Amino acid sequence: MKNCWYADNRDLVKWSVLVNLAVENSASLILQIAYFQEHDFSKVELGEKEKEIPKEVLAHFRDIRNIERISSPIKVHVFNKLITDRKQYLLEAKEFIALHAEDRNVVFLDPDTGLEPTRNPTLKHVLNKEANEFWTKLKAGDTLALYQHQTTKNGNPWVESKREQFENAIKAPRGSVKVGRGLKLAKDVVLFYAVKT
């Protein structure tokens, strides 16, 4: 997830689905695995001069850890290490989850785009094998959720094929991955989720 996308309508969908999932499944904690990538923000102009965006402005509007201050009985912890080396990132993210093993958790995989495409996955994607590794680390009662952005620009259906891909990736029973969405807020994103039994 790039911080430049933080706090738009997609976040209203994401966090509404996640908080409701946590309440519905008696989870006390949402662990966001942010697949975080830095973004270089453009400068602003004052007359003829270019100025950096002040750090305090970025911290207010674009700090992905702001969600940790949500006023809710559900607590949120963000794993916001920069993703540069997938193997190391996955190892540290799983250690982060293990720190919270006492709680019932919603583990939220939050890449820029979603699950890997058939060709040329990048750091904007969760690989199928990574989704499976996260799933295997969860205990019964925990929920795994994945952010998925629309994969087609031509209007063709995309949700069901990606839902099935996620279900196959985590080797969950057929039909156990569900879809959370907010079509009136952002019709180009969904969250896939499954509760581990």
Image (cartoon, helix red, strand yellow):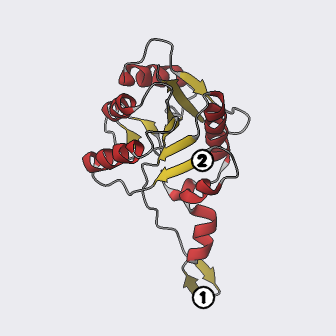
User: Is residue 46 depicted above or below 62 in this figure?
Assistant: below
| Residue count near mark 1 (Cα–Cα under 10 Å), binned few <14, some 14–19, many ≥20 | few
**Residue linked to disc 1:** 48
The answer to whether residue 64 of the structure is visible from this angle is: yes
Report the amino acid beneath label 1: Glu
x and y percentages locating residue 78 in the rendered image: 50, 52
- In the displayed structure, does residue 2 sit left or right of residue 18? left
Residue drawn at x 43%, y 61% is: 38
Q: Earlier in the sequence, mark 2 or mark 1?
A: 1
x and y percentages locating residue 130 in the rendered image: 33, 35
Residue drawn at x 61%, y 80% is: 45
User: Is residue 61 depicted above or below 122 in this figure?
Assistant: below
**Residue linked to disc 2:** 75
Residue drawn at x 71%, y 39% is: 185
Frontmost residue, 67 versus 158:
67
Frontmost residue, 149 versus 152:
149
- In the displayed structure, does residue 25 sit left or right of residue 167? right
Please identify the residue farthest to the top as the structure is shown: 174
Q: Secondary structure at mark 1?
A: loop
Q: CA distance from mark 2 to mark 1?
A: 45 Å
Number of labelled discs?
A: 2
The numbered dot on residue 70 is: none
User: Is residue 133 depicted above or below 5 in this figure?
Assistant: above
| Residue count near mark 2 (Cα–Cα under 10 Å), binned few <14, some 14–19, many ≥20 | some
Frontmost residue, 192 versus 114:
192
Residue drawn at x 58%, y 68% is: 59
Q: Secondary structure at mark 2?
A: strand
Report the amino acid beneath label 2: Lys
Frontmost residue, 171 versus 161:
171
x and y percentages locating residue 35 in the rendered image: 42, 49
